[in-house]
Amino acid sequence: MLRLLTTHHTTTGLAKALDISPPAASMQAKTLRDARLITTQRDGRSVSHYCTALGLDMISASTPPLR
């Protein structure tokens, strides 16, 4: 999920991309937000998620170097 959030996604968009329910996507987003790996912004009824600098660093650290 964290890799998906290198671009903005709504909770519904995450659910569709991961083939999980919106409540499950919301719970996973909350876990990542609590760990300060993503940030969440509400715009009316829509909730958008995106990686924080820490989240992007975690992705970079876990990506194997190209050979």
Image (spheres, grey):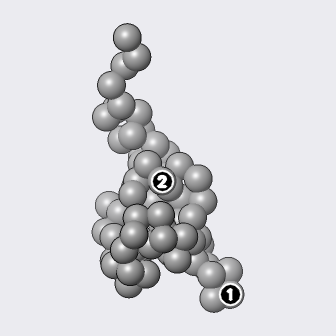
- Judged from the image, the secondary structure of the residue bearing numbered disc 1 is loop
Can residue 3 be seen?
A: yes
Residue shown at the point (54%, 59%) measured from the top left: 50
- Judged from the image, the secondary structure of the residue bearing numbered disc 2 is helix
Compared with 19, 37 (above or below) is above
> Which corner quadrant holds the C terminus?
top left
Which residue corresponds to mark 1?
Answer: 44
**Apparent side of residue 4 relative to residue 58 in the rendered image (left or right):** right
- Which is nearer the eye, 9 or 39? 9
> Which corner quadrant holds the N terminus?
bottom left
Can residue 34 be seen?
A: no
Residue shown at the point (38%, 80%) measured from the top left: 21
Which of pointers 2 and 1 lies earlier in the amino acid sequence?
A: 2
On the image, which quarter does residue 22 sit in? bottom left
Compared with 21, 18 (above or below) is above
Q: Are marks 2 and 1 in contact (CB under 8 Å)?
A: no
> Mark 1 belongs to which amino acid?
Gly
Q: Classify 10 Å Cα crowding around label 1: few (below 14), some (14-19), many (20 and above).
A: few
Residue 11 circle label? none
> Mark 2 belongs to which amino acid?
Leu
Which residue corresponds to mark 2?
Answer: 4
Which is more foreground, mark 2 or mark 1?
2
The picture places residue 20, in percent across and down from the top left corner, at 37, 74
The picture places residue 48, in percent across and down from the top left corner, at 58, 70
Q: Residue furthest front?
A: 19
The picture places residue 32, in percent across and down from the top left corner, at 35, 63
**Apparent side of residue 53 relative to residue 33 in the rendered image (left or right):** right
On the image, which quarter does residue 57 sit in? top left
Q: Residue furthest right?
A: 44
Residue shown at the point (33%, 70%) measured from the top left: 28
